[in-house]
Image: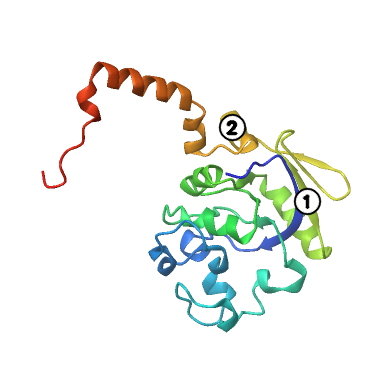
């Protein structure tokens, strides 16, 4: 998982409440058995005027010119500004995958759905909860100033506005530790690889029959 320390990026405003995971990545794209390739279909039903299916060439699609991420001023955005209850709906982990693979590193909103919030941390995406009044101010600033960028400093737990004003945010220490070090659940386990090997060696030495496998036709 990619580490998150300090990130400065262009901000895109998603001015909708209750954005659910089916809007983030529609259900037909969950057919894929891979963990990659979802970024091109992020917000698919809003980004395109035609119906999308897995494996389609994006160049053959009809983009919706009115959708925020299709507007030239937000091309390359890596910080998403959102409204309350972002990520509600089903528990699909594909939602943070799609956001991450599109290029987003952080999402700022007044509130998130619990499962989406947890899944984001596990996939290197930083969801930041800020007061609704602060989010409203940021929406106004993003819309007023093309090229609006924010800096997210996870170590110091602040979002820095272009003029230097800092907005503090909370994050659970364990989640912060994992993001700063790029540890997903597998990475956390692999920190103890030597202990696991030692345990397995001792276990097989005391119970050697465990090393044998059952016949394929058993």
Place of residue 69 in the rendered image (x, y in percent of width and height, measured from the top left): 66, 69
Q: Mark number for residue 150?
A: 1
In which image quadrant can residue 14 be found? bottom right
Furthest-right residue in view? 163
Answer above or below: position of 69 versus 8. below
Could you tell me residue 200's position as x and y percent? 35, 23
- Position of residue 13 measured from the top left corner of the image (x, y, whole percent): 69, 62
Query: Which secondary structure, mark 1?
Result: strand
Q: CA distance from mark 2 to mark 1?
A: 22 Å
Left or right position of 30 against 42: left
Q: Which quadrant of the rendered structure holds the N terminus?
A: top right
Looking at the image, which residue is at 81% across and 40% down? 166
Q: Is residue 7 above or below residue 65?
A: above
Compared across the picture, whether 21 is left or right of 64 comes to: left
Q: Earlier in the sequence, mark 2 or mark 1?
A: 1
Q: Position of residue 12 (x, y in %)?
A: 70, 61
Indicate the colouring scheme: rainbow
At horizontal 67% and vertical 56% (from top left) the residue drawn is: 81
**Residue 47, quarter of the rendered image:** bottom right
Binning the other alpha carbons within 10 Å of mark 2 as few (below 14), some (14 to 19) or many (20 upward) gives: few
Frontmost residue, 11 versus 211:
211
Q: Mark 2 = which residue?
A: 172
Q: In the figure, 78 relative to 1: above or below?
A: below
Q: Secondary structure at mark 2?
A: loop
Answer left or right for 192 relative to 132: left
Who's the residue at 39% across and 60% down the image?
A: 33
Left/right placement of residue 57 relative to residue 9 reads left
Q: Residues within 10 Å of mark 1 (few under 14, many from 20)?
A: many
Question: The C terminus lies in which quarter of the figure?
Answer: top left
């Amino acid at each position: 998982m990619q580490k998150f320390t300090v990130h400065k990026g262009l901000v895109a405003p998603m001015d909708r409440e209750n954005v659910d995971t089916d809007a983030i990545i529609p259900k037909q794209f969950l057919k894929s058995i891979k963990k990659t390739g979802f970024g091109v279909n992020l917000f698919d039903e809003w980004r395109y005027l035609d119906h999308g299916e897995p494996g389609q060439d994006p160049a053959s699609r009809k983009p919706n010119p009115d959708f925020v991420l299709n507007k030239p001023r937000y091309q390359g955005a890596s910080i998403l500004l959102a409204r309350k209850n972002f990520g509600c709906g089903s528990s699909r982990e594909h939602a943070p995958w799609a956001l991450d693979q599109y290029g987003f590193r952080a999402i700022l909103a007044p509130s998130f759905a619990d499962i989406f919030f947890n899944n984001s941390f596990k996939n290197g995406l930083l969801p930041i909860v800020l007061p609704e009044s602060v989010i409203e101010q940021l929406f106004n600033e993003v819309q007023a100033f093309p090229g609006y960028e924010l800096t997210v400093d996870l170590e110091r737990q602040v979002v820095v506005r272009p003029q230097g004003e800092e907005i503090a945010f909370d994050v659970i220490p364990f989640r912060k530790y994992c993001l700063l070090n790029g540890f997903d659940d597998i990475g956390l386990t692999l920190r103890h690889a030597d202990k696991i090997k030692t345990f397995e060696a001792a276990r097989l030495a005391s119970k050697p029959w465990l090393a044998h496998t059952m016949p394929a036709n058993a």
